[in-house]
Amino acid sequence: MLASGMLLVAVLACLSIMIIMSVWRQRRLLRKMPPGPTPLPFLGNFLELDTEKLYDSLLKIKEQYGPVFTIHLGPRPVVVLWGYDAVKAALMDQAEDFSGRGEQAFLDWFFKGYGVVFSNGERAKQLRRFSIATLRDFGFGKRGIEERIIEETGFLIQAFRDTNGACIDPTFFMSRTVSNVICSLVFGDRFEYDNKEFLSLLGMMMRSFQFTATSAGQLFEMFSSVMKHLPGSQHQAFKEIQGLEDFVARKVEQNQCTLDPNSPRDFIDSFLIRMQEEKQNPKTQFHMRNLLMTTLNLFFAGTETVSTTMRFGFLLLMKNPDIAAKMHEEIDRVVGRNRPPKYDDRMEMPYTEAVVHEIQRFADILPFGFAHSTYKDIMFQDFLIPKGTDVWPVLSSVMKDPKFFSKPNDFNPQHFLDDKGRFKKSDAFMPFSIGKRYCFGEKLAKMELFIFFTTIMQNFSFKSPQAPQDIDVSPQYVGFATIPRKFTMSFLPR
């Protein structure tokens, strides 16, 4: 009895020492990490962070602690990089050190580290290499995909004409068009605009994307371990993504039944062929889970970000009719009315190119980018960032950096024009991020945005039921994503 009691005391003593050493080591590491507000147990810096105005909260902390600081999302420490200099120093100058994918609590809950966007290490490298090469084979970033974009824009123009100038919500008009471009690459075909399954998928996508921007989405980012088990909108958002995965699984099954290894039709076929080639490799990353998750990554990312940017753009152009008029004049002068615009036309259309860039900068669809993480203990600007620490490169702070944009909070195309009216590039324009984990859909998105905007404006003028001065261009939600307010508008043939 005495011996067993002594053993229990010894075990408890050992556990206590281990806990004390762990806490001591954590505090020692935190002392060397970038500074930040003192976290509370479990709550972290919850009291300093307004979940409805997270960017503003971080700005206040930055003003006190500088452009590199640490916050705690619940118990999780996150290093925040603010402004062009800090983001470039990390993602470009020390690109390999910061090339891990950090935690995005809600999305990680579903993807669990699978797929090209949310994976790490060798899995991320192999899937990224394969995805870029395969999409390029199907015309990604080349003239072949431009023809698909122009063709799809033609369907959109007809859909707008069929409204006969009525006041409409443009949300699903744009998401159908944008989604069909990526669908042609991933699934090998487009959907008809009245396809009920397609509209249901777009609704699922929009609602789950919107959740990440809400206050509930920010709370989940801080306290996911608890909120997974509590009732709330997070469960409905999870079901929405699950519905998208179920659709992708059905498409994969269809491709499996009709697969010709000698003639791949789309991204899914190419992945299935690679799975067959590596089926004897026990360490292969080409298996069904990665196929489903990568396809879903491409389908989702290729739809929501561009279509949301387009909606924001319509709102901004109705708010600023003088800017829209200048675009109309340049489009008429360079392209005319007898042919569809092409991507190369941008070389002679500096004002339109500047407006499209300014829409992306101002809309700021992914203000915090995707979280990164460190692969090892690293020194960054005299601070220690331990291995596996999440890092937020706040892209919004770069695209609002007053060193690069004279009026960062205003919608002003002059940010991208020089004194002679020529288009001017900016190093601080990084809506697609930079470095090892930049969005490889950048070329496609830029091509889509230019062609969509110019073709729509070649054919239509915009009219809001509100006077320009009454149009509210402030976003409805700002969190992981920026979501514009709902609105209606008319497309009036020119």
Image (cartoon, helix red, strand yellow):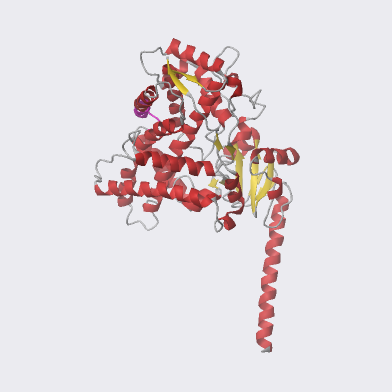
Q: Residue furthest top?
A: 333
Depth check: 166 or 303 in front?
Answer: 166
Q: Residue furthest right?
A: 64
Q: Position of residue 60 (x, y in %)?
A: 72, 39
Q: Tell me what residue is drawn at x 39 percent, y 38 percent.
A: 199
Total count of labels: 0
The quadrant in which the N terminus is found is bottom right
Q: Which residues are magenta?
A: 140-150
SS majority, magenta: helix
Depth check: 111 or 142 in front?
Answer: 111
The quadrant in which the C terminus is found is top left
Q: Tell me what residue is drawn at x 61 percent, y 49 percent.
A: 219
Q: Position of residue 21 (x, y in %)?
A: 70, 65
User: Does residue 16 appear in the picture of this structure?
Assistant: yes
Q: In the drawing, does residue 125 fall left or right of residue 468? A: left
Is 463 one of the magenta-colored residues?
A: no
Q: In the drawing, does residue 369 fall left or right of residue 133? A: right
Q: Tell me what residue is drawn at x 57 percent, y 18 percent.
A: 417
User: Does residue 440 appear in the picture of this structure?
Assistant: no
Residue 53 sits in which quadrant? Answer: top right
Residue 138 sits in which quadrant? Answer: top left
Q: Position of residue 307 (x, y in %)?
A: 46, 32
Q: Position of residue 132 (x, y in %)?
A: 41, 38
Residue 448 sits in which quadrant? Answer: top left
